[in-house]
Image (tube, rainbow, N blue to C red):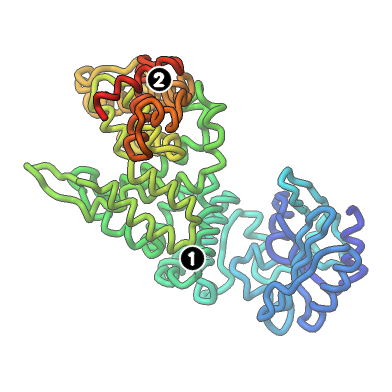
Amino acid sequence: MNNLAQLLKDTIPQGYYVGGIVRSSLLKRFSTDIDIALPPQDVKAAAYALAKKLKAAVFEMDPELGVWRLVTHQDNIQLDLTAYQGKDLKADLLRRDFAFNALAYPVASLPEIVIEKQKTGNAKILLKRLRKAKIIDYAGGLSDVSSKVIEITSSHVFQDDPLRMLRAFRSSAELGFTISPRTLSQIKKDAALITQPAGERVHEELERLFATDRAYENLILMDECGLLTALFPELEPQRACAEVYYGEGGVLKHTLLVFRREEQLLARIEKFFPQYAKQLAFASQQKPLYKMAALLHDVAKPATAKMQKGRLRFFYHEQKGAKMAKLILERLHYSRADIRLICAMIGEHLRPSNLASNDVITDKGAYHFFRDLGPAAIPMLLLCWADYTSYITDEQLKKILPKSAERLMSIAQAQKTANVGKTLRHLQVLSLLLKKYFEQPKKIQPTRLVTGRDVMEVLSLPPSPKIGEILEAVAVAQVEGKVNTREEALAFIRQQKSCT
């Protein structure tokens, strides 16, 4: 569709490319769609005229704002036509959130449109050969793009749409831009308004923020502005909880450090688990989910904190935390599948620590771990890695990392080097579990040798929960190497007759 720019000029010469498409093109970054602003009276007719020429699907996306969307059948290009918000183009641009988004370029000036087809089937677009003299800039957006600064267009932008506060941090993370002091100051004043946007809109912004490798630094800034705990009020009690243990900032400080480690891990899986880099590559596509689990993993610690024999304990915080996380995620309109995964990770994140309390990790123990956790097992091990390594410095982690895949040290050996030794032993437990999962699958998911019908026929039993118990006993026997064939499994079942 090389003639798209010319077709747009011929059909809507009065239009202007606006917003993200202009800013991104100046940064030589592709956009997912094309936004064009038009006088209100022209939008509907222009939408139908373009749809006919482009052979595109067309529909009115937002009647109130006068937004029409077109999607081409051939290249799956998304094009939005929007009526001026205000009396003219200048008023429209100055109502936008940030100066770098308040830029426009005349359709009639005929930029070159580059279309890049994605594996997903969607298209990405870039405007080339933009002449700076033709760029319309009433808010200093060109200067902000050049200096990589995010600056609000007015003091009421967040009151007009509070989600823009979160968008500032998301844009900073995606683009590597700095948020201006004026913008940060305004966010501090308006932070409480963040509860107003619909949960699905907040979810979308968080997902895009967490998909970057700069989410941690922006969460820290969000917290300094009061936006983080305005968005997640359940985290505020963490700030003053267990400061005697975690230092100033309490559990919240720990939570953010775990988030940081999770971000580091997901950004470079091959660095921390070189032997399983290929098997764990899927995790890089799940950054938003796994980082959300890290953010909420200790959400219930303040509610469960109790002093016992002079020691601060958090009994059942993981179970209560899973319930609290469910409510938070439902508020943000996460899918049921995503909620189940995150809550399973949170609700069971002490399991590897419990395994580590034994000098030997048996095949039976590993089998039960992976059986109980199911699809949450590997993601939860990554969360535990972030949790354990949050207690040591980067330099300490660098020193012990090569030893993390070595044979499991004893508890006594770990205690000789205090906190670092404890962390190393926990990392070795994680490595051992991953080894069993990836290299010894028969120990983790043994092939079923017999069925429930076999059990009923051999033992002359009617259907009952007892059948499942016997099948489980067979599986454990396989894991322990006591049963290897169908014949041995049937013989094992016959031995259970005295127990029925």
Residue 346 vs 479, above or below: the answer is below
Q: Pick whichever, 95 or 401, lies toward us.
A: 401
Residue 49 visible to the viewer: yes
Label 2: which secondary element:
helix
Q: Residue at x 71, y 54 (%)?
A: 31
Q: Which residue is mark 2?
A: 490
Q: Position of residue 240 (x, y in %)?
A: 23, 55
**In the displayed structure, would residue 126 be above or below residue 278?**
below
Q: Quadrant of residue 348?
A: top left
Give coordinates of residue 313: x percent, y percent: 17, 44
Residue bearing mark 1? 199
Q: Position of residue 111 (x, y in %)?
A: 85, 58
Q: What amino acid is at disc 1?
A: Gly
Q: Label 2 crowding class (10 Å Cα cut-off): few <14, some 14-19, many 20+?
A: some
Residue 263, numbered circle:
none
Q: Secondary structure at mark 1?
A: helix
Task: Write the residue at 46% across / 23% down.
Answer: 449
Left or right: 6 as drawn, with respect to 289 = right
Where does residue 234 sit, x and y in percent of width and height? 32, 60
Q: Quadrant of residue 491?
A: top left
Which residue is rendered at x = 49% and y = 57% of the image?
334
